[in-house]
Image: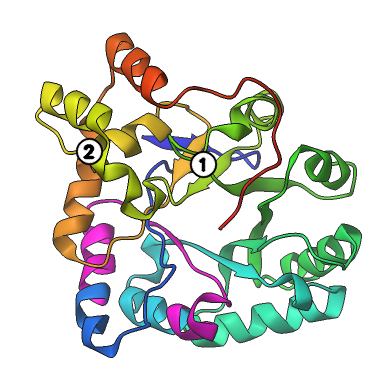
Amino acid sequence: MTVLLPSGETVPALGMGTWKMAEDRDRRADEIDALRTGLDLGLTLVDTAEMYGSGASETLVGEAVAGRRDEVFLVSKVLPSNASAAGTVRACEASLRRLGTDRLDLYLLHWRGGIPLAETVEGFAALQAAGKIRHWGVSNLDLDDMLELTALPGSCQTNQILYNLSRRGPEHDLLPWHASTGIPVMAYSPVEQGRLLGSPALATVAARHDATPAQVALAWVLRLPYVNAIPKAGTAEHVRENAGALELELTTEDLSELDRAFPPPAGPSPLAML
């Protein structure tokens, strides 16, 4: 299962997030093992950011993918406070050093700050010209922001947003716009950091398929062909569970049941973020 980027490249629909990794030294070996297990299973889209652990997550990812860099579609993000034209370049170069690589496959603006989008895009263009990033995109941008961004030069490849069964606000206007433009969405926290797992509706659907609630939550996000999901998993066992979502096809009955438990939005709402 893959998602098509505007560039014409395809990336795995299900990847791996790393937010809150590298925060506990006792979990480091398990986290590296989890990432390497994910690569073995084809979950080669790996997302990190300079903000995560103040760079510690990038260092951990670099260790996990060492020797396998060419298998990975590697994503990192620049903080809005660093996202001037020159600052974006400096931040990316620091991320590359921590990751132990010479390029990123995708570099994102983490969220919109006070620096004009045009300046950040200028920095992205300079990084592309230098071969330090292959593609660029954004994160946590709502529809008005995306309209402003896409009027600028260059080609945005994705918008990484908070999207899951309990965070369906983007379905009103942002997701339809993405579907119409061919710019995919990358859903972070697709299981709402585990808070969805106690849902009776998820348990009912999961039992019907001999699956787990987490697999149902991920399969629901992945039902849309232009949406990636990047759940974080700190153990190899958890990664294997997540990968099982790729084998789960939700029925019309399943989707209706989930809609009753988690109603779609009745109108527009501001984009939420964690």
Q: Nearer the viewer, residue 49 or 254?
A: 254
Q: Position of residue 250 (x, y in %)?
A: 28, 20
Circle number at residue 213: 2
Q: Are marks 1 and 2 in contact (CB under 8 Å)?
A: no
Q: Residue furthest top?
A: 252
Sequence-first tag of 1 and 2: 1
Badge 1 amino acid: Tyr
Range covered by the magenta-colored residues: 32-57
Screen quadrant of the N terminus: top left
Q: Which residue: 57% across, 81% down? A: 96
Q: Nearer the viewer, residue 161 or 103?
A: 161
| Quadrant of the rendered image containing residue 133 | bottom right
Q: Which residue: 26% across, 67% down? A: 234
Q: Secondary structure at mark 2?
A: helix
Q: Is residue 179 above or below residue 101?
A: above
Q: Secondary structure at mark 1?
A: loop
Mark 1 vs mark 2, CA separation in Å: 16 Å
Q: Is residue 119 above or below residue 158?
A: below
In the image, is 87 to the left or to the right of 201?
right
| Quadrant of the rendered image containing residue 49 | bottom right
In the image, is 192 to the left or to the right of 133?
left
Badge 2 amino acid: Pro
| Quadrant of the rendered image containing residue 66 | bottom left
Q: What residue did someone put label 1 on?
A: 163
Q: Position of residue 193 (x, y in %)?
A: 37, 55
Magenta segment includes 190? no
Screen quadrant of the C terminus: bottom right
Q: Counting other residues with Cα less than 10 Å from the Cα at mark 1, is it few (<14), some (14-19), or many (20 or more)?
A: many
Asked whether residue 9 appears in the rendered view, the answer is: no
